Image: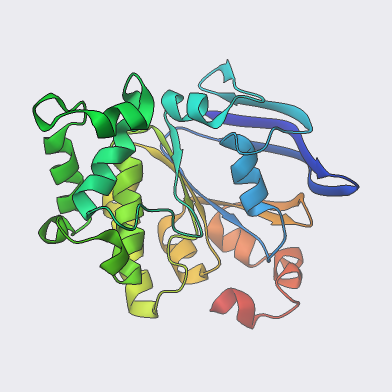
Amino acid sequence: MLALREVEKRFGALAALDRIDLEVTDGEVLGLIGPNGSGKTTLLNTVTGVYPPSGGRISFQGTDITGWKGHRIARLGIVRTFQNIRLFPTMTVFQNVWASQHSRVSGGLLALLRSRPSRRCGDTRRVEEMLELVGLLKDREVLAKHLPLPARRRLEVARALTIDPPLVFLDEPAGGMTPAETADMARLIHEVVAPNRTCVVIEHKMALIAGVCTRLCVLDFGRKIAEGLPGDVLADANVREAYLGTDDALDA
């Protein structure tokens, strides 16, 4: 589905990504892990058009998308959530998900927001379905800024899924959560996000990664240092050394 061939991203003399080869196959849940500064979010930003790659090629479903702008990539069906949550804080839960459909509307978000209720391009039933799936339908009229952190992260997931994308990137979906909240997010990924689509999860919490991912890729200093089944990768000596040289970091 998604293929990276010798992808590089440089910021001056810094090689944030160094000749990364990676394939994401249709229907899998790939975990992308590594210590802070290893290049995980840079890889995500490069694939989704936030940054153009400095070298290499990126293809999606057979189409070369190297250097494409983010809006074109989103319209192909590659969507993401953000480590630092990006919602419309003064819009309701319902409005946030409805507005996320702008990538499929002629004229974009501004045209969608200007449209009259009787002529809305967004699919209201689809929005309600997404809110029910993530457990937020009862909060549809609540302003996003008033939601607790776990609900805001669930709202970001609903926004990502509303256009039914084939490929979803989740950037630290359990960031800042308690163990119980993390377990709830793992269930949401397993039961709602992953079925019938491909998913890439960036996360530091190994309990979530081991519970939902079918394969892992590990980055360190912009290079891929391991790839394979979760059990094999998490037992790899190079991987354990990359996580501050301790066993505890991977057992958390």
Residue closest to the eye, 17 or 72: 72
Left or right of 250? Residue 37 is: right
Asked if residue 79 can be seen in this view, the reply is yes
Q: Position of residue 89 (x, y in %)?
A: 34, 58
Give the residue drawn at x 8%, y 27%: 118
Residue closest to the eye, 217 or 152: 152
Image-quadrant location for residue 153: bottom left
Give the residue drawn at x 14%, y 45%: 128
Left or right of 182? Residue 13 is: right
Give the residue drawn at x 28%, y 65%: 151
Asked if residue 196 can be seen in this view, the reply is no
Image-quadrant location for residue 126: top left
Left or right of 63? Residue 238 is: right
Q: Position of residue 189 (x, y in %)?
A: 34, 54
Q: Position of residue 82 (x, y in %)?
A: 48, 53
Residue 214 to residue 139: above or below: above
Left or right of 173? Residue 91 is: left
Count of numbered labels shown in the rendering: 0
Residue closest to the eye, 93 or 45: 93
Give the residue drawn at x 29%, y 39%: 99
Q: Position of residue 162 (x, y in %)?
A: 27, 38
Colouring mode (rainbow / by chain / secondary structure / one colour): rainbow
